[in-house]
Image (cartoon, rainbow, N blue to C red):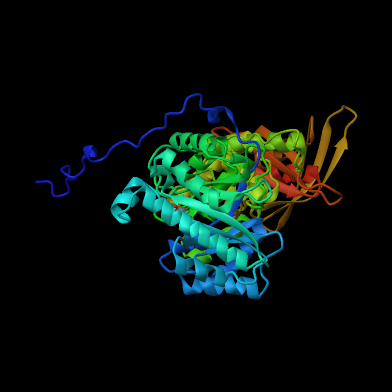
Amino acid sequence: MNTHAIPTARFDHRKYAPAPTVQLSNRTWPDNPISKAPLWCSVDLRDGNQALIEPMSVEQKCQLFSLLVEVGFKEIEVGFPAASQPDFDFVRRLIDENRVPKDVTIQVLTQCRDALITRTFEALQGARCATVHLYNSTSKVQREQVFKSDKKGITALAVAGAKQVLACAQKQTNTQWQFQYSPESFTCTELDYAVEICNAINAVWQPTLENPVIINLPATVEVASPNVYADQIEWFCRHIQNRDSLIISLHTHNDRGCGVAAAELGVMAGADRVEGTLLGNGERTGNMDIITMAMNLYSQGIDPALNLADMSRIIQVVEQCTAIAVHPRHPYAGELVYTAFSGSHQDAIRKCIAMYELKHGLEHDSAQPWEVAYLPIDPRDLGRNYEEIIRINSQSGKGGVAFLLEQHSGLQLPRWLQIEFSQVVQHETENIGGEISANAVWQTFEQTYLAKQDWLLERFQLEKQPSGTNYCHATLTLAGENVDIQGSGNGLLESVVNALQEQFAIPIDIVEYSEHALTEGTDSRAVAYIKVRSGDLYGYGVAIHQDTLSSSINALLKATQQIRG
Ligand code: KIV
Ligand code: ZN
């Protein structure tokens, strides 16, 4: 009997029903591409914090708050102060220590209960401006099974909460107040009832163009595909009263892995504002990841209105505060997302980057959009460098190895040497069974082609003869002894080949040769690459020298010496 058989009895799809769809004629959202960033509200310190195994300390919250401000959030939900003493203390600290910049509004969450609302306003005493975020659950399941109530009862609870929020706010007139209401579990609420309860709240709060109310429509649990959420948002926006005086906000969770997609389609469907967390921490599979959504906009040429350039610091602070590691393949932020191991990917990236730099120099030219195979954005924008893009293991090809060498030391290996050297590297990675660093690739190259040679060129003289041929007289050191060689030929290399043949009786043909300057400016050096053949044997030589002729002769000596053994 197979003791590892997968049990099938309980794995029965008939247990589940499809999520309802929306009757929406002439939906417009599919034709409304996003053209500007939504208003962002970070809920890292509230929803994100509520989902942590170990909630953040006040110190950690202060650290994360500073990061959120630096990144450019203008609205930050800082906690649920009536439900948690550390949240209360943190809100007090922000206010008492004057930590909230003038252009930033803090937001706090409260349920529709008298004592909680009173405590919430205590926490906010002395705030310059603040958003009070009131919520209750509105879905059928919640109404009937959790609250044992009906639509009327749930609406009455919300309206009583809204009235108390208004009354408390009217007593604290030094604060500039904004109100927000969330029909929690909106996506599982009948749409006409969601509109009805929000209209009832707005009848209390009386939003105006100057003083809009935020209506936040949460996908508390993501139960349908993102197009259904977009339909719900468009339907809601069409039916809610006084739409112009409302800020329609989205708050998606990621249960089906589409939290970002749902928020994107929801913005296309007419929403103005999006709540989420940096890197997607939050209940269950997380909140909508603001970094991914913002970078998606950025990659489409839209200013995300957040500065994510120092991604490694963002990751470091988020990991420190949440104790959750970022997945190496996390969109835009993961350690491996700009890395290519596959040879064909490496080759394509190398060619496209070379072309991009040739066209634009190293400076960004907005007239010419980024177009590099396999890289949706330029990793340098997030502080990542090219060495991270191309990493070498046994899957890698010549292109990647050549790219790393060029980045590391300026060597532009000719194709024939790329082929030869990539085999040396592959041999090494297969032996190691893993990855080798750019530095290790360089060291392998050095040991294979550049390490100290036995035959050294001491000096040479080249003369043009009346016949037109070149005559070369060179002095080599060979195992500590000086040896003079001389020969003539059509060019320098031919005359040295002939001289070597004369001296050591080695018949040699030059099969490949190329050279290039290594650095620019007055102290530039030259590198020469040579492949020679003697019968069935091949030798490879590379040499770097201040002058081109010496680097060429030295490369030839190395290649010849390889054949001689
Ligand atoms: O997911 C949710 O519904 C919430 C509400 C409190 C907005 O976090
Ligand atoms: Zn939430």
The residue at the far right in this view is: 466
Is 554 on the left-hand or right-hand side of 462?
left
Q: Position of residue 142 (x, y in %)?
A: 34, 51
Q: Nearer the viewer, residue 302 or 243?
A: 243
- Given residues 517 and 383, the one toward you in this image is 383
The residue positioned 65% from the left and 45% from the top of the image is 304
Report which quarter residue 34 is drawn in. top right
**Residue 37 visible in the picture:** yes
The residue at 47%/65% (across/down) is: 323
Name of the residue lying farthest toward the top: 26
Q: Is residue 564 visible?
A: no
Q: Nearer the viewer, residue 362 or 310?
A: 310
Q: Position of residue 301 (x, y in %)?
A: 67, 38
What is the number of callouts on the image? 0
Q: Is residue 307 above or below residue 421?
A: below
Could you tell me residue 518's position as x and y percent? 76, 46
Q: Horizontal placement of 2 versus 208: left or right?
A: left
Q: Residue at 46% x, 43% y: name it.
A: 196
Residue 417 lies, with reference to residue 524, above or below; the image says above
The quadrant holding residue 264 is top right
Give percent across and percent down for residue 398: 56, 39
Give the left or right position of residue 301, taking residue 336 as reference: right
In depth, the one of 365 and 120 nearer the eye is 120
